[in-house]
């Protein structure tokens, strides 16, 4: 690979997840990339908080979820 990994979750896979899992409260998509997965979750009524280490045009940029002490509950909406 040349550079950081980028593998957006296909829309169909996110819909399959929603069909099999129920979510409540804030969801932190901590590796949101270009927002592909987050946008589907938002469309279905989920409250999303989005970040990524790399700038892919979506969410808060520069936040490393591996070293962060944040949680979805501690994000400002």
Image: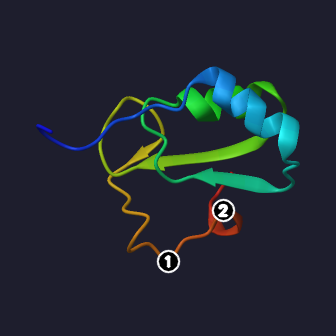
Q: Is residue 11 above or below residue 53?
A: above
Q: Position of residue 39 (x, y in %)?
A: 64, 27
The residue to which callout 2 is attached is 72
Q: Is residue 71 above or below residue 56?
A: below
Q: Determine whether, in the image, residue 62 is placed left or right of residue 1.
A: right
Question: Which disc number belongs to residue 69?
Answer: 1
Rendered residue at 33%/36% (across/down): 6
Disc 1: CA contacts within 10 A as few (<14), some (14-19) or many (>=20): few
Q: Determine whether, in the image, residue 1 is placed left or right of residue 33.
A: left
Name the secondary structure under disc 2: helix
Q: Position of residue 37 (x, y in %)?
A: 60, 33
For the image, the number of numbered tags is: 2
Quadrant showing the N terminus: top left
Towards the viewer: 6 or 32? 6
Disc 2: CA contacts within 10 A as few (<14), some (14-19) or many (>=20): some
Q: Is residue 65 above or below residue 19?
A: below
Question: Which disc number belongs to residue 48?
Answer: none
Q: Position of residue 60 (x, y in %)?
A: 44, 46
**Colour setting:** rainbow
Rendered residue at 71%/66% (across/down): 73
Rendered residue at 22%/44% (across/down): 4
Towards the viewer: 68 or 16? 16
Towards the viewer: 54 or 2? 2
Name the secondary structure under disc 1: loop
Mark 2–mark 1 distance (CA, rounded to whole Å): 10 Å
Q: Determine whether, in the image, residue 30 is placed left or right of residue 46.
A: left
The answer to which quarter of the image holds residue 10 is top right
Rendered residue at 87%/54% (across/down): 24
Q: Position of residue 75 (x, y in %)?
A: 62, 61
C-beta proximity under 8 Å, tags 2 and 1 = no
Name of the residue lying farthest toward the left: 2
């Amino acid at each position: 690979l040349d550079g950081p990994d980028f593998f957006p979750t296909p829309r169909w896979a996110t819909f399959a997840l929603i069909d099999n899992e129920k979510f409540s409260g804030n969801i932190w998509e901590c590796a949101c990339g270009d927002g592909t997965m987050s946008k589907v979750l938002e469309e279905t009524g989920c409250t999303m908080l989005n970040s990524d280490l790399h700038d892919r045009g979506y969410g808060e940029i520069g936040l490393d979820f591996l070293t962060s002490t944040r949680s979805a509950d501690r994000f400002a909406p």
